[in-house]
């Protein structure tokens, strides 16, 4: 039976492996082996770190050879790029998506989207009534 991996375990492993992933993106060598294309297993010519929304540490690298990178892009369907924090995230581990498309057409990770919505809510809760109160006070004088 398949079940979701422990988020705590994933974050612990990610914290231990951050330097390894950063080095692998620069050298295209991971665990003393040449990094291979995620699609066709050819030697990779491009690599990038990817994250998930559950922690700040990189969770792995994605890699592509020159041909796959030109035809499909480095990210493919498994990952997306957040327009706000400019990190590349895994799209999902199971059925839920970790991204949100805004009305402006941008793609945001759920963490950045949550921060944007919180800012909008605070604006509506605090600034709109404040502006109305100031308007009422102005007309009262």
Image (cartoon, rainbow, N blue to C red):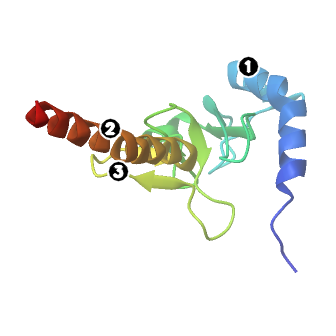
> Real-space Cα distance between discs 3 and 1?
36 Å
Q: Secondary structure at mark 2?
A: helix
Q: Which residue: 56% across, 34% down?
A: 87
Residue in front for this viewpoint, 21 or 130:
130
Residue in front for this viewpoint, 109 or 132:
132
Residue at mark 1: 27
Residue farthest front in this picture: 141
Residue farthest bottom in this picture: 1
Residue 131 seen from this side: yes
Q: Which residue: 56% across, 61% down?
A: 97
Q: Residues within 10 Å of mark 1 (few under 14, many from 20)?
A: some
Seen in the image, is 136 located left or right of residue 8?
Answer: left
Residue at mark 2: 127
Q: Nearer the viewer, mark 3 or mark 1?
A: 3
Q: Which residue: 67% across, 46% down?
A: 52
- Which quarter shows the N terminus? bottom right
Residue 72 seen from this side: no
Residue in front for this viewpoint, 72 or 49:
49
Q: Residues within 10 Å of mark 3 (few under 14, many from 20)?
A: few
Looking at the image, tell me whether mark 1 or mark 2 is earlier in sequence order: 1
> Real-space Cα distance between discs 1 and 2?
50 Å
Q: Residues within 10 Å of mark 2 (few under 14, many from 20)?
A: few
Looking at the image, tell me whether mark 2 or mark 3 is earlier in sequence order: 3
Q: Secondary structure at mark 3?
A: loop
Q: Secondary structure at mark 1?
A: helix
Residue 68, position as x, y percentages in the image = 52, 43
Residue at mark 3: 102
């Amino acid at each position: 039976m398949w079940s979701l991996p422990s988020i705590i375990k994933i974050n612990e492993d990610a914290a231990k492996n951050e330097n390894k992933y950063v080095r692998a993106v620069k050298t295209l060598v991971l665990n003393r082996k040449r990094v291979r294309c995620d699609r066709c297993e050819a030697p990779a010519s491009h690599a990038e770190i990817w994250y998930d929304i559950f922690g700040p540490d990189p969770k792995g690298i994605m890699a592509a050879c020159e041909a796959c990178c030109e035809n499909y892009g480095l990210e493919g369907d498994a990952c997306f790029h957040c327009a706000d924090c400019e990190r590349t995230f895994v799209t999902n581990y199971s059925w839920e998506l970790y991204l949100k498309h805004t009305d402006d057409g941008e793609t945001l990770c759920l963490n950045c989207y949550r921060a944007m919505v919180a800012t909008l809510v605070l604006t509506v809760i605090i600034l709109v009534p404040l502006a109305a109160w100031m308007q009422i006070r102005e007309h009262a004088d």
